[in-house]
Image (cartoon, rainbow, N blue to C red):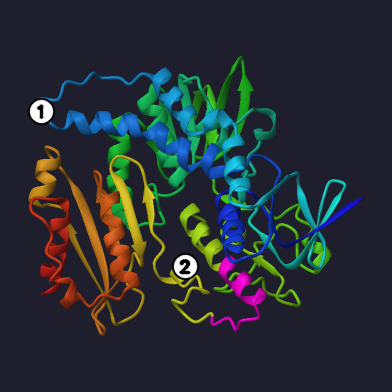
Amino acid sequence: MADETYDVVVIGGGPVGENAASRVVQGGLTAVLIESERYGGECSYWACMPSKALLRPGNLLAAAKRVPGVPVGDRIDPAAVFARRDSFTSHWDDSGQVDWAEGAGITTLRGHGRITGEREVTVGDRIVRARHAVVVCAGSVAKTPPIDGLDAIEAWTSREATSASEVPDRLAVLGGGVVGVEMAQAWAALGSTVDLIITGPRPLPMFPGFVGDAVAKGLAETGVRLHAGSGLDSVSQVDGFVRLSLLGGEELEVDKLLLATGRRPATDDLGLASIGLRDGDPLDVGDSGLVSDVEGRWLFAAGDVTGRAPLTHQGKYEARVVGDVIAAQARGETVDAGPWTRYAATADEHAVPQVVFTDPEVASVGLTEPRFGVHRSVEIDLAVAGGALHADGYTGRVRMVVDAEREVLLGVTFVGQDVAELLHAATIAITAEVPLRRLWHAVPAYPTISEIWLRLLEEYGL
């Protein structure tokens, strides 16, 4: 076997792994980035980028119809949408990502990496050793629920839903989380008859009820039929279509079934058992990214494999922290991983921003509900002059969670058309712990949707 050594070995060439490798190289170390599929990872080819490219045309059409005088048709052109989507995925060609990595001073190695010992990773017939650290950034994979008959059909996961180039006449989506609602609306806008099957009373159960209600209404306006308080009992292939037996006895016949039932860390085949960890489990890390229950400070992890905050932007943030920690350790420096230092991913616990790109949009950061007695929530309709100008009949709602004792912001949740661009202001206010009485002096420009900040603070009592 060939044997080679680098300062840092990174497993997983998605955006998280790219950031970890880039950061250690910037810190003066050498790094090899190991990828088994495509450099750029899930986000670039099957998640963030293609899914938003599929959603954007339908959202724009709906928005244009809300402003009189804008000449619009009733349908979007699927072929044009797919072509634009394909341009964002570079037609599933990762050569540009490889060029970027190598241009940044990172060595690339294609193959499946498995940990086979301390600071040792085996890739095919090559053994790659790390002088300082191994970083696991292997991401996550789709969960498959135990449903009778599922093994006998070709169901979609999020990968097929974001990469398909033909519109199914009838699509069923199982699951009311982010992937479920986004893909249900995207494919309905593209022309599918869509049935969304969820177990609870409303979609997006991880958000406050007013969010799920607003998104359910938006889905209905796009033509999605919602089957709430339900689930799948069994599925079967019948004469070219899929028959679904729902809990409660209802039956549906569809052309495609999309399983949007969550994701799990991709740690099944990483060789974790060779270092005393359990294959398939998330990697338990602290704020510095150091993996617990492994002797020595050599194994780190970032992104979905940790289960901390499974979002691309948050994983990239964690990777930057990990890279800085490893580089500092290599220089012999003492690493202070206290809260809000460059060596701690403190925001994972306090200010994780997320957007659901449906129509209406959902944007949330920090707490969505009060947790302790000193917490207070303020909830109002998103009714400001900027919204009224933005779209006829503009509707939305906002909740703000405050530490009333310290009078600082702990969380904000928005739902409404185009609220995503409001989110970073909330993220800054939370991470900087801006006192509300100082935030009162951040005067929102008139007439913009940002006026909602003034209304929230007035409702709070300022």
Q: Amino acid at mark 1?
A: Pro
The numbered dot on residue 270 is none
Give the labeled residue for mark 1. 68
Reply yes or no: does residue 344 show up in magenta. Answer: no
Report the span colored magenta: 322-336
Query: Image check: 184 left or right of 454?
Result: right
| Disc marking residue 348 | 2
Mark 2, residues whose alpha carbon is within 10 Å: few (<14), some, or many (≥20)? some
Judging depth in this view, the residue of 314 and 278 nearest the camera is 314
Counting residues from the start of the chain, the first of labels 2 and 1 encountered is 1
Number of disc labels: 2
Residue at the (66%, 64%) spot, across then down: 29
User: Compared with residue 387, is residue 334 higher up or lower down, i.e. above or below?
Assistant: below
Label 2 sits on what residue type? Asp
Using the image, determine if residue 222 lies above or below residue 363: above
Q: Quadrant of the C terminus?
A: bottom left
Q: Position of residue 451 (x, y in %)?
A: 13, 57
- Specify whether 296 is left or right of 438: right
Residue 134 image point, x, y percent: 71, 63
- Magenta segment main secondary structure: helix
Please name whichever residue, 392 or 257, is drawn nearer the observer in this view of the structure. 392
Magenta-span inclusion, residue 325 = yes
* Residues at marks 2 and 1, CA–CA distance in whole angstroms: 43 Å
Q: Which residue is at 65% across, 37% downward?
A: 148
Label 2, secondary structure: give it.
helix
Asked if residue 357 can be seen in this view, the reply is: yes
Question: Which element is circle 1 on?
Answer: loop
In the drawing, does residue 115 fall left or right of residue 321?
right
Give how far across and how far down residue 455 sits, in percent: 12, 62
**In the image: residue 275, left or right of residue 440:** right
Q: Could you tell me which residue is drawn at 64 percent across and 28 percent down?
A: 154
